[in-house]
Image (spheres, helix red, strand yellow):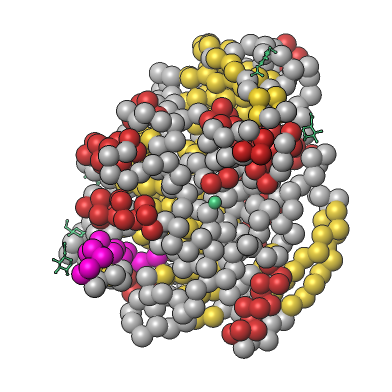
């Protein structure tokens, strides 16, 4: 359903009656050692003015750096670490409710080997050990390596830890930094990445993310896109993805969310248990938030309470996810964690023709809680483009009442779609026209976001399109806390928008 970016751009421009200046450049990329056609659209920013103060912006900046194809398996980004049975695909996530633990996951390819993590506060001096577990699975005719999972807990806050896994000459070492203790004023910088995959665009997103200096990733689902392959190759592409992202995921926790590409319901292979490979590979600390499933859970980190929802698990009234969320919202203490963030895969407000309204059922189930509990921001992926909403809600819609349009609502969250990590399906560049007035800014480019929480009242939000490097704030604004706000200071949506000047350079 996502055509190659060039075709889509052309039709977009044609229908807008604008002559686009398309330069096809053959780029010799030194790093990849490949000749890659590079499509550059030279500079247009379109402003679409609706007749209200909520007029949003549709940026027509589309620059598709590389074709949407997965990097070949023999590329160095997927390199298998040297040494017999060396640990690979190392990744960590928060291991408890409050940030004093991590779960470390790695794969040994040939034999189970050791489940031990050796760790400590100085390099190469490991004063502590923790013992994990190992498992393996088959998926049709693919047999996984040995997937180790080890909880390292009772850590000190705000401390750098070094850790080592594997045996003898094959041992490998990494490090991570624990977050500050739960404190209303604690600062922390989150990155938000969605729909990443394993293409050259994915690599660009990862590299830009590394430059951002963020400390924790909120991954809004659709990880490896291994389900685009068949049979044995599916497992192989989960492994290559694990090696691809290790350079980030071994050093800082990623809080992951299941997307549709994690479902892998594959009757043709007699593989019908949803999320099978994902759940073997990406455990979560769900029990710490009294969830009954690794697919939905919550963690608290620094000054943020982060709720992770599963768009593809039952969530209507009376289901486990619904009941859990109802209880979790009651546990949120904005005096301890002023920032309330929800992440999910399918966006609730989005105006792209790709996946339009797929989030509607979850909106009907949960939106009134998002407003009631004054959620600060909701991040989603799924749509391969970037979009930000104003604070709006549609909670008065009751089928017969006639009111079915979202309205400005100061208690509502900002909805941000960051499904633009760069996977092999390409960009979703067909936005609904005209831009609905709930949509503040939208652009079909690859990138990632960061949310830098400064203290209990202010956070800096920044979307970075890959083409810009780390310094250009393509969409940036100051997010004021929904609970700790100065009601005296009137920040209207218009002022909020004034912080955000879409950049029109080429
Ligand atoms: C897991 O590995 C063991 C030991 O190599 C093997 O005997 C077993 O069949 C594997 N299990 C699965 C589910 O493949
Ligand atoms: C897995 O099964 C597919 C389809 O039956 C077959 O083409 C492929 O060669 C098999 N691969 C392995 C490694 O067994
Ligand atoms: C947070 O910072 C504010 C302003 O500096 C201060 O008044 C407050 O006591 C701090 N709260 C905590 C829990 O440190
Ligand atoms: C639906 O909304 C309309 C308009 O707000 C209201 O008059 C009506 O009572 C509502 N119906 C129900 C069943 O809540
Ligand atoms: C600010 O605080 C007031 C009072 O708690 C609240 O009514 C309002 O919804 C909050 N949010 C914004 C954006 O003003
Ligand atoms: C919170 O951070 C913002 C942005 O850096 C700053 O303007 C504000 O003064 C800070 N508030 C407190 C209480 O430190
Ligand atoms: Fe998706």
Quarter holding residue 293: top left
Camera-side residue of 436 and 186: 436
- Asked if residue 207 lies in the magenta stretch, the reply is no
Camera-side residue of 136 and 130: 136
Residue 47: horizontal and vertical position, in percent? 49, 81
Q: Quadrant of ligand 2?
A: top right
Residue ID at (35%, 30%): 291
**Above or below, comparing residue 437 to residue 331 in the picture:** below
- Whether residue 487 appears in this view of the structure is yes
Q: Is residue 134 left or right of residue 358?
A: right
Camera-side residue of 206 and 363: 363
Q: Is residue 143 left or right of residue 490?
A: right
Q: How many marks?
A: 0
Residue 450: horizontal and vertical position, in percent? 48, 52
Residue ID at (47%, 49%): 345
**Above or below, comparing residue 91 to residue 38 in the picture:** above
Q: Main secondary structure of the magenta part?
A: loop
Quarter placement of the C terminus = bottom right
Quarter holding residue 86: top right
Residue 220: horizontal and vertical position, in percent? 49, 47
Q: Is residue 220 left or right of residue 333?
A: right
Q: Which residues are magenta?
A: 389-401
- Whether residue 484 appears in this view of the structure is no
**Above or below, comparing residue 482 to residue 21 in the picture:** above
Residue 161: horizontal and vertical position, in percent? 52, 24
Residue ID at (39%, 42%): 314
Quarter placement of the N terminus = bottom right
Residue ID at (53%, 14%): 132
- Asked if residue 392 lies in the magenta stretch, the reply is yes
């Amino acid at each position: 359903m996502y055509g190659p970016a060039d075709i889509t751009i052309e039709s977009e421009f044609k229908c807008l009656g604008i002559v686009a200046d398309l330069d096809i450049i053959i780029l010799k990329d030194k790093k990849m050692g490949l000749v890659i056609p590079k499509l550059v659209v030279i500079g247009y920013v379109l402003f679409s003015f609706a007749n209200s103060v909520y007029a949003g912006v549709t940026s027509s900046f589309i620059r598709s750096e590389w074709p949407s194809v997965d990097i070949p398996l023999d590329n160095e980004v997927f390199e298998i670490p040297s040494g017999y049975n060396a640990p690979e695909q190392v990744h960590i996530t928060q291991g408890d409710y409050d940030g004093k633990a991590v779960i470390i996951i790695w794969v040994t390819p040939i034999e189970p080997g050791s489940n031990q993590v050796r760790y400590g506060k100085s390099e190469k001096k490991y004063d502590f050990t923790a013992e994990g577990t190992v498992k393996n699975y088959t998926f049709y005719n693919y047999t996984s390596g040995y997937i180790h999972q080890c909880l390292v807990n009772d850590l000190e806050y705000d401390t750098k830890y070094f850790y080592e896994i594997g045996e003898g000459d094959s041992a490998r070492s990494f490090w991570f930094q624990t977050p500050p203790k739960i404190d209303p004023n604690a600062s922390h910088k989150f990155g938000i990445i969605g729909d990443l995959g394993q293409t050259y665009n994915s690599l660009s997103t990862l590299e830009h993310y590394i430059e951002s200096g963020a400390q924790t990733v909120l991954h809004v689902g659709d990880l490896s896109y291994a389900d685009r392959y068949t049979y044995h190759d599916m497992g192989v592409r989960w492994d290559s993805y694990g090696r691809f992202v290790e350079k980030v995921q071994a050093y800082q926790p990623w809080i992951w969310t299941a997307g549709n590409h994690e479902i892998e319901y594959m009757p043709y292979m007699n593989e019908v248990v949803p999320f099978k490979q994902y759940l073997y590979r990406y455990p979560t600390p769900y029990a710490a938030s009294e969830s009954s499933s690794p697919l939905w859970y919550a963690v608290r980190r620094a000054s943020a309470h982060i709720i992770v929802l599963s768009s593809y698990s039952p969530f209507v009234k009376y289901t486990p996810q619904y009941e859990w969320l109802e209880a979790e919202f009651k546990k949120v203490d904005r005096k301890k964690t002023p920032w309330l963030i929800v992440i999910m895969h399918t966006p609730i407000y989005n105006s792209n023709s790709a996946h339009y309204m797929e989030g509607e059922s979850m909106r009907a189930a949960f939106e009134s809680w998002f407003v009631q509990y004054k959620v600060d921001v909701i991040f989603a992926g799924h749509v391969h483009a970037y979009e930000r909403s104003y604070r709006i809600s549609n909670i008065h819609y009751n089928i017969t009442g006639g009111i079915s349009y979202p309205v400005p609502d100061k208690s509502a969250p900002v909805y941000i779609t960051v499904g633009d990590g760069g996977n092999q399906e390409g960009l979703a560049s067909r936005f609904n026209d005209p831009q609905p007035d709930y949509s503040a800014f939208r652009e079909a480019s690859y990138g990632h976001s960061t949310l830098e929480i400064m203290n209990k009242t202010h956070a800096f939000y920044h979307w970075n399109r890959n083409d810009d490097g780390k310094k250009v704030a393509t969409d940036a604004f100051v997010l004021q806390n929904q609970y700790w706000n100065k009601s005296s200071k009137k920040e209207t949506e218009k002022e909020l928008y004034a912080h955000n000047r879409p950049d029109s350079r080429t």
